[in-house]
Image (cartoon, helix red, strand yellow):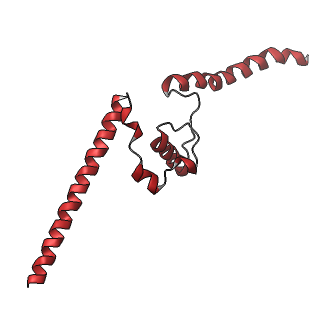
Amino acid sequence: MWFEILPGAVIITTLLSVPIYAMYGLDKLTIGNAFRRNMDERFSRVMYQRDFRLTDNPYKMNGLEQIPDEEEKKEEKDPNDDSDDPAIKKKREKERKLREKQLKKEEKLREKQLKDEEKQKKN
């Protein structure tokens, strides 16, 4: 009869649904969040990187209110300096040193330009 197919259909349906529900636990173990973000399109990857950069959590919903204004950037101190994670501290320290190095290069370049201008005025 038609109902003889039910046990096989239940088994097949169960086996096909196992990977879907297993990924919830695997993602929770591997990435610390139960849901992955789709990275198929370039725009999705860019948004993932933006969210990670802004809040250090790409799974937290972010909008325009999360992007600080230019005035706010200048006024606020870095609130993330008190982080306990050594990897984040190391990354921030590296970024700070890179910024200082770039500022020194710009300063030297300005001094050189000023010296060149003074030489041209004398001649």
Q: Residue 118, percent across and down?
A: 12, 77
Q: Quadrant of residue 6?
A: top right
Seen as rendered, the residue at the extreme front is 75
Residue at the image position 58 percent from the left and 48 percent from the top: 63
Q: Residue 47, percent across and down?
A: 53, 47
Q: Nearer the viewer, residue 37 or 63?
A: 63
On screen, residue 80 versus residue 55, left or right, reads: left
Seen as rendered, the residue at the extreme right is 1
Q: Nearer the viewer, residue 74 or 15?
A: 74
- Quadrant location, the N terminus: top right
Q: In the picture shown, does residue 34 fall above or below 67?
A: above
Residue at the image position 55 percent from the left and 36 percent from the top: 59
On screen, residue 94 versus residue 112, left or right, reads: right
Q: In the picture shown, does residue 108 fall above or below 4?
A: below
Number of callouts: 0
Q: Quadrant of residue 111?
A: bottom left
Residue at the image position 52 percent from the left and 50 percent from the top: 42
Q: Quadrant of residue 16?
A: top right
Q: Residue 5, percent across and down?
A: 83, 18
Q: Nearer the viewer, residue 79 or 6?
A: 79
Q: Residue 69, percent across and down?
A: 49, 54
- Quadrant location, the C terminus: bottom left
Seen as rendered, the residue at the extreme bottom is 123
Residue at the image position 21 percent from the left and 56 percent from the top: 104
On screen, residue 26 versus residue 4, left or right, reads: left
Q: Nearer the viewer, residue 72 or 38?
A: 72
